[in-house]
Every structure is written in structure tokens, then in C-alpha cells.
Image (cartoon, rainbow, N blue to C red):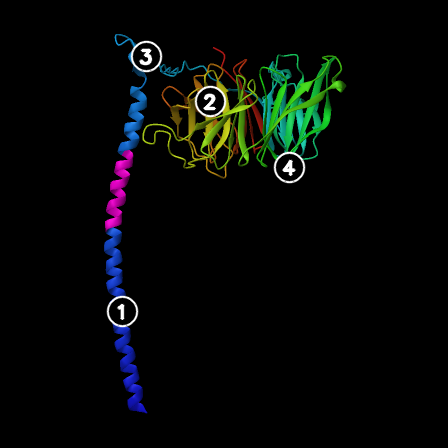
Amino acid sequence: MDLLGDLGTEDQLTSTRAENKVLKERVEYLEGRCKVLTVENEALKAEVEIYRNEAAASNIHASTVPASITEGTPQSTTKVTVQDDFVKGGDGIYTKSKEILIENLHGPSNILCCSLSNDDSMLATGGADQYISLCPWTRAFGNTSSTTSDLVQSSTRINCDAPVIAVDFARKGHSTKFLAAGCMDGSVHVIHYETTDGVLEATKVAHGSIKHAKYVRTLVWSPNDNVLATASADGSIQVHKLNWNLFDPSSVTMEKIQTLQLSGPVESMCFHDNHLCCYARGTPYLIYFDLQDNFTQTKINLNQGPGNAGFDEHVSFAVMDIASHGSYLALATDTSRNIIVDFQTGRQIRNLYGHDNDGFSQPKIAWSKNGQYLYGNSQNDSVICVWDIASSEIVDRLEGHDNTVRDIFSSQSTDTLVTTSFDKKTYIWLVPAE
């Protein structure tokens, strides 16, 4: 029995050695194959890069096209001029003076959003306490104290029954006294406000007209008409028009114009001319909807540029905020990168770096009034970064907050910037007096 056991053990060892030899040979073969595939992969990458560069170069050369191709006249050429408004450096005029500090507009609760009325006289903030605070902040001018507690006491508060994530004033003219607020429960509240004999009064109108299935991510009013667009984490955009008789706010109705369903949660949105520009998470596109052409959509590939020639469908980042100015859009991404793009072509004009914003942050941006500078927050700092767009460099860091800046609003009527933070502070910044 012992002899048989020894023979069995020897056979097993022989079999194991044979299997190990086969496995070793297989590993050596696979290692060699991996080396070959690695070389081939690098070669393919180089070839693809060549094709992309050639495609990008062909797009550039196409800007000067012989007219004979289109007109049959070989002597002349047709030139397409690409405009760049950011060749000259900024003139140094941007908001940097901390004129007004308002603390605890929402008590111990965090302030989540802010906006100024068209004439810049009224400040609206939304908080985690489920309230909107309407504050005539200009009354603070001449106040001997930099902290204006009287403004907090005199502000008007409107209960929205859920944390207020987004707020914006109606943008058509200075006489349209409406604002809208988007909330965590998917509801949108439209509010009419009026100051009579020095007393500010605010009333909800068209109550319950707008409702999303998930929380409202952002909302914006059109500058050309009383049209309100609201976007949600449920992927939907609702577009309503405010109708009223100019005398009786109780007659206000919100007429639904269109409902749009995107492929993912809508992260950011703005109006540009008569287009609604938006971004849905998980896509490599900006989408424009033409309000004058039955919401016809145009997609702008965010990956276009030298090196990939617009063919890359990879989702490199999410656009968390969009701001419009002149012929351009500014995009705040979750990859510590802000981008200036040409609205018509989607061509990337500038890329702005030097701050920190990842997928767990809330990047916010705003243009200076003159369009030469861009304001933006940074995830790990309590400052406002100021970029000179021409040079793509940070030229200033506005200090004052003690915690992460949650929202930014920059007036396009005056050089006025509003910032709110998790430190419960709201700052009004102006251009320093000479």
C-alpha cells in the first residue's frame, strides 16, 4: 500500500510539472503577444493622431476657398474671417471692492442661490430654510457699518415649502416685477413684487403651474420676452410664457409653450439671443433650441478642436454652468476647466485653468460687464477667481468669504457682482472708486 501511494504521488508530481510547463509556455506566449499588441496600439494611436491633425488642418485651410469652386471664377478667392474679440488684454475694470456685506439672510441656514433684478436694486437669495429673501440692498449705501443687519430685518421672505436651489428675475425691461424660484421638490414658484410707499410686498402668482418630477437644477428668463425655462434632474425642460394685463398681478397665467426631454439630467442652461442653450449630463454636446423655429435643435460637439477634429464622442466633463455674453458662451466644467466658446460654431476660444472643481463641486461662472473678465468659484478655496480672458490667466482672487462660494451673479447693466457662500454671507462687490 505504501508503494502504491508513493507511485501515485510521483505521478501527480509529474503531471503537475507538465501542467506548469504548459502554463509557463502559455504565459510566455501571452507576454510576447501583449508586447506586440502594445506596439501595434501605439502605432494606431500615432496614425489616428495624424488623421485628426490633417482633418483639423483641412478645416483651417478651408477658411480660404478658391471662388472657382463655387463661382467658376478662378481669379478671385473667398475668405472666411474668424473673429477673436479677446486679442487685447483687459482694461483692469472689474468688481473687486467689497462694498456691502449682508450676513445671515437665511439665519443659520445655507444660502444656495442669488440674483439681482434688471435695475440691480433688488437682491433675491434662496436658502436651505425653504425661503426666498427679497432685499432692497441699495439702502445700505451710506451705512456706517460694513455689516448691514438692518437689511436682514427689512427683507421680505417668501415660503416655498422646499429648499430653494435656483432663482432668477424676469429680464424683459425694468418694469416687469417678477422672479421665479426652483426648489428641491421639483416645484417652481413665480412671485410678483412691488414697493409701495417704501414697503416691499411680494405675492405668489400662478401657483402650481410648473412642476417637475425631480428637483429643479436651474431656471432662466429670456431677455427678449417674458419666457421662463426651467430644467430638472429628471431630464426635462419646461418652457412657459408669463401672461398678465400689466395692472393686476392676480391675473397672471403661465402658458406652457413646450416640454423638452433630454437624455440625462439637465445641469445648466442659459438664453442666447432667441436660443435656449443647455447641457445634459452624460453627453458630449451643447444643445441649442431655436425658439423662433419651433424649437429646432442644434448640437455642438464639446470635443472639437485640433487633435480630435470634432469626431470624439467621449464625455470628458460635465458643463455645470453656462453664461452668455456677446457672441460667446462661458462654460464651467467639473474638471477644473472653464471654456469660452463661440456661440455660432462652438469653436473653443479660450480654456481657463488655475482653480479646483471636480464632480462633487458646484462650479459657477459669470461675465464682467465689459466681457473682458470671467468670475468663477473654486471648490477648495473661499475666493472668487478673476480671469483675464485674453491671456487666460487669473489676475485676481477676491477674498472675503470664509467658506466655499455657492453662487455668483454679475449684472450686465452695472459693474455689480453678488456672491453667496456656505459661510452665510452675501457680498455685493463693485468697481473701486477712482
Q: Which mark is residue 79?
A: 3
Asked if residue 320 is positioned above or below residue 61 in the image, the reply reads: below
Measuring from the top left, give residue 35's x and y in whole percent. 24, 51
Mark pair 2, 3: CA separation: 25 Å
Front residue of 182 and 36: 36
On the image, numbered disc 4 is attached to which residue?
Answer: 213
Asked if residue 155 is positioned above or below residue 315 in the image, the reply reads: above
User: Label 1 amino acid?
Assistant: Asn
User: Label 2 amino acid?
Assistant: Leu
Viewer can see residue 209: yes
Asked if residue 384 is positioned above or below residue 42 in the image, the reply reads: above
Mark pair 1, 3: CA separation: 70 Å
On the image, numbered disc 1 is attached to which residue?
Answer: 20
On the image, numbered disc 2 is attached to which residue?
Answer: 329
Quarter of the rendering containing residue 138: top right
Query: Who's the residue at 23% across and 55% down the image?
Result: 32
Q: Which residues are magenta?
A: 36-49
